[in-house]
Image: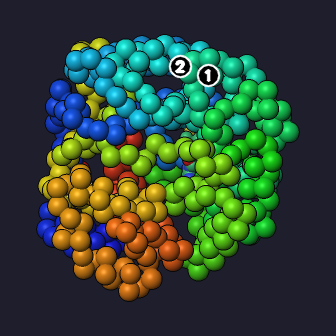
Amino acid sequence: MSIITNLTRMWLTRSSKPFVFKNEYDQQLPYADCDSLGLYVHIPFCENICSFCPYCKVRYSKELCDRYIDALIREIHVVGSQHTGKKETTSLYFGGGTPALAANRLKEIIDAVREHFVVTEGIGAELHPDNISPSVLHTIKDAGVTKISIGIQSFQRKFQGILGRTDVDAPAIRKALSEIPFETVSMDFIFALPGQTFHDLKADIDTAFQSGANHVAIYPFIDFTFTSSTVTAMPKKEKHALLNAITQYCLDKGYTRSSIWTFSSEKEAKYSSMTRDYFLGFGCSATTLLKDQFKINTFSVDDYCKRIGEGKLPTSLTTRFSVRQRMVYYLFWTAYSTKVDAGDFEKFFGVPLKRMYGMELKAAKLFGLITGENGVYSMTLKGAFYYHYYESFYTLAYIDKMWGIMRKEAFPEKIEL
Ligand SMILES: C[S@@+](CC[C@H](N)C(=O)[O-])C[C@H]1O[C@@H](n2cnc3c(N)ncnc32)[C@H](O)[C@@H]1O
Ligand code: SF4
């Protein structure tokens, strides 16, 4: 698997150099000139740990959560005060874990963010279905949250059973959402579960839109090597057919494909913490992407609090990009939105996209993976599947390896990908 990702990386970066992540970091983060900057805050606590989940999280305890949030607020102040005046940012997303377990402290965190940053496109938070009560929704809405994303996974008992989760109470969710509405209500589903059919997925998506969602995310199941999941992955052919069928269904219903995995029933509904040019991440495991560097905070809650207590940033690893590496990174994440605008690329890098990747664009068009009009390249249905297919290689070759190490070591010496 890593042969494919290594060869692609070597070809696109025109270099045999791997991405090298080292145990070093800048205490001052150069984000002042980064336009279109997003913010991300990680809350790594869950009531129950799901066996299939790769994210950085530990079981919730009030004492640990409070200590962590005190440290998180300090990290926001340390980074935020490096800029004079308030820096404009697009959005702020809370992910996890289960951010609603800290619902009563979200306002404090948002206030800390607002001391240093202006957020222009709203605040999002990931929620577990068990969090959807009028009182939690009230608390987070009062704190400033404007978009929510609920980890439904499936409305059907048989799939919740496979995933080791409990049933979702759709009518209760619908009632709570009708009492306390949000600008975007997204619901997450996992697809390509054993035995899952088009009709299963279609029923889930229909129920989501009938229960108050205006946006859905359909993530393909990924079997990370370091999780204890026993769920078997669906064969490629079956997965391809299922993805095509469900995409076609959503398009026929008039939903907008806002990214590879997401569809919205209303144009304004948007929920994505991934597709931005730059981002600052706060909290355990949070990542930061700047002009020429990418850094990852430690996965250890204790070491995170300790570092912050010493007045240092909790960065575990940093990679410093070559220009070509940064281009590949840019293209990979921009393509997630299913479109790449050559004008934006040129504005970002100061060179035309065609000059850097003309041959690849031609080949992609020839194979029917993309279409191009007025300098905007859009993925076809086939292109979206192959992007997904390549992304799963990337996830297993890069993310699986890195997260597998970082779960065990708070500050690894070096990782080469
Ligand atoms: C942080 S969780 C969402 C919020 C909340 N913790 C919950 O579980 O409901 C983020 C989402 O990642 C997705 N996810 C987790 N593990 C996955 C895996 N192995 N493969 C694909 N998607 C996964 C799930 O859809 C999940 O809703
Ligand atoms: S899927 Fe959600 S609830 Fe389950 S362990 Fe992951 S973050 Fe926690």
Extreme residue in the front direction: 374
Residue 57 rendering spot, x and y as whole percentages: 50, 35
Q: Quadrant of residue 116?
A: top left
Please state the horizontal and vertical placement of residue 192, each as a whole percent of the image.
Answer: 63, 65
In depth, the one of 98 and 174 nearer the eye is 174
Of 46 and 12, which appears nearest the observer? 12
Where does label 1 land, which residue?
Answer: 140
Query: What residue is shown at x 57% (from left), y 26% (from top)?
Result: 145
| Mark 2 Cα shell of 10 Å, populated few (<14), some (14-19), many (≥20) | many
Q: Amino acid at mark 2?
A: Leu
Within the image, what quadrant is residue 282 found in? top left
Please name the amino acid that badge 1 sits on. Ile
Q: Which residue is drawn at the image coordinates 58% and 55% (left, top)?
A: 262
Q: Do callouts 1 and 2 mark residues in contact (Cβ within 8 Å)? A: yes
Indicate left or right for 276 with 202 as reference. left
**Label 1 SS:** helix
Q: Is residue 203 left or right of residue 256?
A: right
Pick the residue in front: 274 or 415: 274
**Rendered-image quadrant of the C terminus:** bottom left
Q: Which mark is residue 106?
A: 2
Residue 245 visible from this viewpoint: yes
Q: Residue at x 66, y 32 (%)?
A: 182
Quick check: can you spot residue 163?
A: no
Look at the numbered disc 2 and give the secondary structure of its residue.
helix
What residue is drawn where x is 79% and y is 32%? 178
**Mark 1 nearby-residue class (10 Å; few <14, some 14–19, many ≥20):** many
Distance Cα–Cα, label 1 vs label 2: 7 Å
